[in-house]
Amino acid sequence: MSGATPVTGSPMATEPGAPLGPAPMAADTLATARPASLWRDTLGSVLHQRSAVVGLTILTIMVLVALFAPIIAPFSPNDSLLGVESGVQKRSAPCIHLLGCPESQPQHIFGTDGNFRDVFSRVVYGGRVSLAIGFAAVGFAIVVGTFIGAIAGYFGSATDNVLMRLMDVVLAFPSLLLAITIVVALGGQSYFNALLAISIVSIPIYARIVRSSVMSARENDYVTASRALGESSRGILVRRIMPNAITPIVVQGTLGIGAAVLEIAALAFVGVVGIGDAEWGSMIAFERNQLFSAPHVIMAPGIAIILAVLAFNLLGDGLRDALDPRLNR
Amino acid sequence: MTRFLLRRFIVTIPVLLGIVFIVFALARMIPGDPCRAVLGERATDAVCDDFIRRYGLDQPIPVQFVIYLGQLASGDLGDSIKHSRPVTTLLVERLPTTVELTLWAMTFAVAVGVPLGLISGYKRNSPADVGTMVFANLGVSIPVFVLGLLLAFVFALVLKDTPFALPPSGRLSSGVSVTPLVVVWGLQDLQGPLRGILDFLSGIYTFSALITGQWGAWADSARHLILPAIALGTIPLAIIARITRSSLLEVLGLDYVRTARAKGLSERTVVIRHATRNAMLPVVTIIGLQLGALLSGAVLTETVFNLSGVGRTMYEAITGRDYVVIQGFTLLIAVVYVLVNLLVDVSYGLLDPRVRAQ
């Protein structure tokens, strides 16, 4: 842990004028005390970033809560408690026995909603939808975007022009409007369609990142060397060039999941998907008109969205500071 | 410079064509029967056949596309299936709300975001800096609709009987209206595009009430705009503050700033005249890019605050399968967005000679 430049093993460390010819991927550091591990160094520098640690902590908790939702949630997210639990009231305010709420009232940490359902259980289950769609949508967008960007950047000229203009067209639409249109065009209100829509809308970002990484790496001496050694185009692209794009992709992907969580909540809020489901945006939409009478029903899922997005943003910023040596000012 | 402008403009053309094509294709892909979506489930086949023929929906898709291009070229966006009115009329009616909201949101974002970013960057690691960055991190993480509802809750309920109370919905209080420009200026007989432009401007209440001196209505519409503009402007505000901060930090570390200090210029002059000016370049780009995000946010803001603008109309059109409105509005929004970015690129070229030379 020498504090100065922790990420010496990073694939970004390819100075264009570096005197060494051999591919930096095969860095044979002769006799070091402990084997230099890219992953260990990276992890070390990430954990030095306060924002990354905070983001990662919130995120870990949220993922665990979502995974163990059936254990954590005291009630079913979708079933009304009317007639099931004695004394349950419609849109009752939060009641926690430990904090002095009378024992005669049933305990609901975040209160109940208009259908006599436990808001806390709904928020807990809602995390499953948001996180799953967030991860899946960004994963899909990264795969497709990387593919497009790599081809555009590596082959250049006409291929590049056509692909990137296509990306420009997608970027020209306000993302939410395009996502709504795509969900509707795909045949309606399923989460899978929402996932696809959110994904399609964010493909151009990754395509652009990969393209510019590929274009700047393409001219390096070690790439020329690989080519001279007879490596195939695909081999060069996958093994020699793509590692340069990993850092920006990871950073953008992390921020992108936050954006996807916002987007799925927005789609649900306008009623394009998940009407009535235990999903954060749709919970808010469902109780919108009760803002003045029962604000807790809206604020609980609202805060959940904020926390989730904040966690991804903090982690993404932290990762950028840790992984990109150019920013170490 | 002319070559730079020309080249930049030519690159835009295929993008615009692509937009037209995608808009057309997506609108056609929307499943469901447009006739029954509009006329109701119980419309008879005969009525529907007539309906489909009237709107050219029986033609092959390529033919429909060519017809559509021809209409576009003559400035005709078609008639709304649902409202049976020209889309252009609908636009003149609904667009001002969104334009006004977006402009105020952006003004708020720039007016607060840039100074915050500058202070934050100049006093790096001070409490002000830390506070700003925490605020910026929260700002980009709050969904527009949650912030909007939160603001409505605070200003319309908690502060109800204080002077800070603000209306949570609509554009004007009931009983208040803004007299249109054509009426004020006695031009009711005017027709054609000029009339459209005047009606459009009349719809931007904070503008039309201001230039015609309707002070009461102006104040009322401004009060209605505060909450939506803050809700919509907070995300760009946070982004602008962050970009301004990092950009200023970068510029302050450059040699020419050291030279300026070494010359004995006052710190004020160094920071404001020398550093800030160059630090503004990336901020200009971000402002342009944020416009698209603002239009997305406008859909949500308009829903929360019951404003019948472009976003709301679009949403209603999509769920009601009003192809013509979807096409017209999406097209307009995308074209505006592309043109704004063109403008940003051009202004970038004007501000920074190096961009022109590339």
Image (tube, coloured by chain):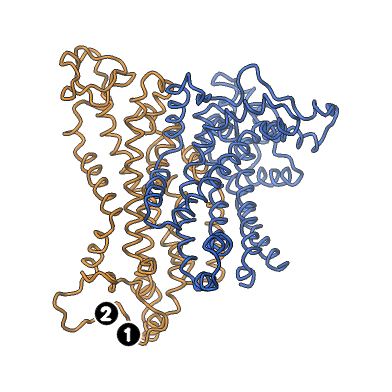
Chain colours: A orange, B blue
> Could you tell me which secondary element the residue under label 2 belongs to?
helix
Dot 1 and dot 2 residues touching (CB under 8 Å): yes
Image position of B171 (left or right of A281)? right
Q: Residue visible at 13% across and 77% down?
A: A33
Residue A107: quarter of image: top left
Q: Nearer the viewer, residue A192 or A251?
A: A251
Say few, some or many: other residues with alpha carbon within 10 Å of mark 2 (under 14 / 14 to 19 / 20 or more).
few
Examine the rendered structure and indicate whether residue B303 appears above or below residue A67.
above
Question: Label 2, on which residue?
Answer: A26
Chain on which label 1 sits: A
- Residue A123, percent from left and from top: 29, 32
Image position of B120 (left or right of B180)? left
Chain on which label 2 sits: A
- Residue A285, percent from left and from top: 41, 28
Q: Residue visible at 71% across and 68% down?
A: B3
**At label 1, which amino acid type do we have?**
Pro
Examine the rendered structure and indicate whether residue B114 appears above or below residue B54.
below
Q: Nearer the viewer, residue B235 or B339?
A: B235
Say few, some or many: other residues with alpha carbon within 10 Å of mark 1 (under 14 / 14 to 19 / 20 or more).
few
Image position of A180 (left or right of B135)? right
Question: Label 1, on which residue?
Answer: A22
Residue A120: quarter of image: top left
